[in-house]
Amino acid sequence: MRNPFRIRASQRSVSDEEFVQLFGAGALDLMEKVANPWGGLVFLRSAPGGGKTSFLRLLTPRPLRLTDQLADTDQQVKETRDALRDVGALTSSGPDLLGTMVVFTSEYREMAGFDRANALFRELVNSRIVIATLRAVLDRAGRAYPEDLDKIHFDWAPESGATIPASANGRDLFDWASEIERGFYERMDDLGVTPPVKGGHARLDGLKWFAHVRIRDPKGPVEVKRVLLLDELQTLAHGQRTSLIEFVTAAREQCGVWIAERLEALTHRDLLSEGALKDRDYEGIIQLERRWSGSKAKVFGRFVESIANLRAAKADGFENRNFFTLIEERDDLTAWSERFDQASAKIESLIGDANGNGNRYDNWLDEGRGRSGSALDRALHWRTTQILVARDQRRAQSSFDFDALASQELEKRGSSATERAAEHFLRTEVEAPIYFGKDVLSAVSSSNVDQYLEVAGELFDEILAKIRFRREQPMPLSPERQDALIRKVAASRWEGLVRRLPRGYEARRLLEAIGEYCRQQTFRENAPYAPGVTGIALTMQDRALLIDSQDDDVRHLIPLRDVLTSLVAHNLLVPKLDHQNNGKSLVVFYLNRLLCVQFGLPLGYGGWRAKSLKELMHWQEKGAKAETLVKEATLV
């Protein structure tokens, strides 16, 4: 019995049929802002694991054909088919799109050192486009590759100097492309004594050929929309990537071109400039995590829930169970009653001590003592009161106001944010579970599908174990176990940061300092930033100094700039622009939600504290001592 949450749908080891059955139709909502997906240039970007390759794979011939065929017997696949029809990839008569996928790898980067004009790079890309098209045409026709290459034919009017044959069958084109491939590898074998580069292509003829070539398969002319799918551009050398994008952008051919790449391919100006931070996706660019955040968070939640149920249904022996019915949404309060009652008694005593010989909090104490409800309700009331007492003491000391407070002041001074802070404080103090339930699973993913699957997969492992050893319906996974498993994933990811990131040690030192600082600010006794602090902010002036100045002017800031850029590219810091405070405009960098779990923070957005570049540089270089953070928190 394997855990289907461990399967990555983009992996080639997953069959096309299994891939289609695992695909969440909600992903196609991402196309709603793309006006001309099959006739223009679209960039698809995300941190690792955002779902780019899976999205492109769905647009290739076999998955499209299987989606159309399986939809009549599989309700989940039917939803995908209907969504594909809405965007024009399928019609009632079948696929109406020829999606041709070229996946880039590190082998291209290896030629950059001796292919200074990128001529050989373009030559290789042209051949790969042709080969990918041959495969796509045969897949669309349900024919075997490469056995049936002689059954398809291609005609076009090449420009002067183009080397792609004007009229050829698939076998001829395969031989043409294979000759280029052989020449490429021969050059690579001679890298040690590389002479000046000879040959190569001055243009990206493969794109023009793909857009204009007339295609015939055994059924006749292939008259469908065409989209060239270029995946993993971040593996290219900088010059190769820039050259390819410039050629594609300038060509403006009458076909769709989708370019998928990780955010790490972008520069600091691409990721941290004011335009990039405005949180406004525009036509032609889909940044996956951004599209799923903010007002779309609930849509993302429904999307990943559907993925979870699709995955669970694939597990041997899981039968017709629903994944989320096996995840408890609420605590068993009776199990925690004693701890909550102990907390209530302790807090009551502390408020009594704060009252001293006076009567300022008498009414509030009476209100708490007369409180009914569950042990949790009573403890939450006391914890909220404790926060309000801490706030009042600061206020009273500054105004010399020590009169008794009416019980009505409790409700007047409280708020939903304060109550959420009180619950987070209380659960932390009594070591009750915090991170559990399907909404938390979605929240801790930080809008990243792979992160969601990792967390959900950890929970599903335990559910599978219960099913394996119990023939009857297993008990749902308790909040305590969910909390422990989610914290386990967070800790594992934290330990792996150094390996995954450039300047990994510096990046982790900076994140650790930010996380500890947020924790200190969150757990201040008066909860001034309820329900908690989960980010730090820079003024736009500091951002401009960090990003827009010439490198020589800010050389001492370059390490910080590079680390911040890397953390944003890997979705570990999430930037939000245009926060206003005391007449200043700031950009806030929120922690990835699994980092919030690592530091015991709440999962909401909103709480942040401004920091200077000097402070961030110190944190990155030296780390932050806990005692320094405590001292800093008491001075704010």
Image (cartoon, rainbow, N blue to C red):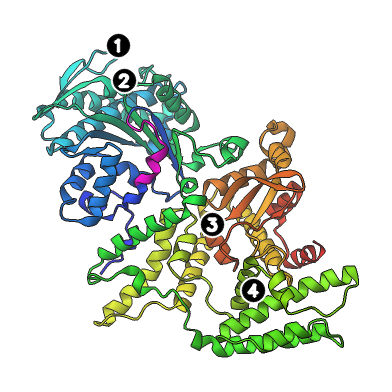
Which residue matches tag 1?
A: 159
| Badge number at residue 422 | 4
Question: Which quadrant holds the C terminus?
Answer: bottom right
Q: Is residue 441 above or below residue 40?
A: below
Q: Residue furthest top?
A: 160
- Labels 1 & 2 near each other (Cβ < 8 A): yes
Q: Which residue is mark 3?
A: 497
Residue type, numbered disc 1: Glu
**Is tag 4's residue or tag 2's residue first in the polypeptide sequence?**
2
Where disc 3 sits, the SS reads helix
Of the residues under marks 1 and 3, which one precedes in the sequence?
1
What range of the chain is rendered magenta? 28-38
Query: Which percent across, then down, holds residue 99?
Result: 27, 35
Vertical comparison of 633 with 408: above or below: above
The local secondary structure at tag 1 comes to loop
Task: For the residues labelled 1 and 3, say whether their Cβ atoms are less than 8 Å apart.
Answer: no
Quadrant of the frame with the N terminus: bottom left
Q: Nearer the viewer, mark 1 or mark 4?
A: 4
How dense is the environment of label 1, judged by Cα within 10 Å: few (below 14), some, or many (20 and up)?
Answer: few
Q: CA distance from mark 1 to mark 3?
A: 50 Å
| Mark with earlier residue (1, 2) | 1
Q: CA distance from mark 4 to mark 3?
A: 31 Å
Position of 146 compared to 447: left or right?
left
Marks 1 and 4 sit apart, C-alpha to C-alpha, by: 71 Å
Camera-side residue of 50 and 628:
50
Of residues 311 and 96, the one nearer the viewer is: 96
Disc nearest the viewer among 4 and 2? 4
Residue at image point 45% right, 73% down: 482
Based on the picture, tell me whether residue 538 belongs to the magenta stretch: no
Residue 34 within the magenta-colored segment of the rendering: yes
Look at label 4 and name its amino acid. Ala
Left or right, residue 323 beside residue 595 = left
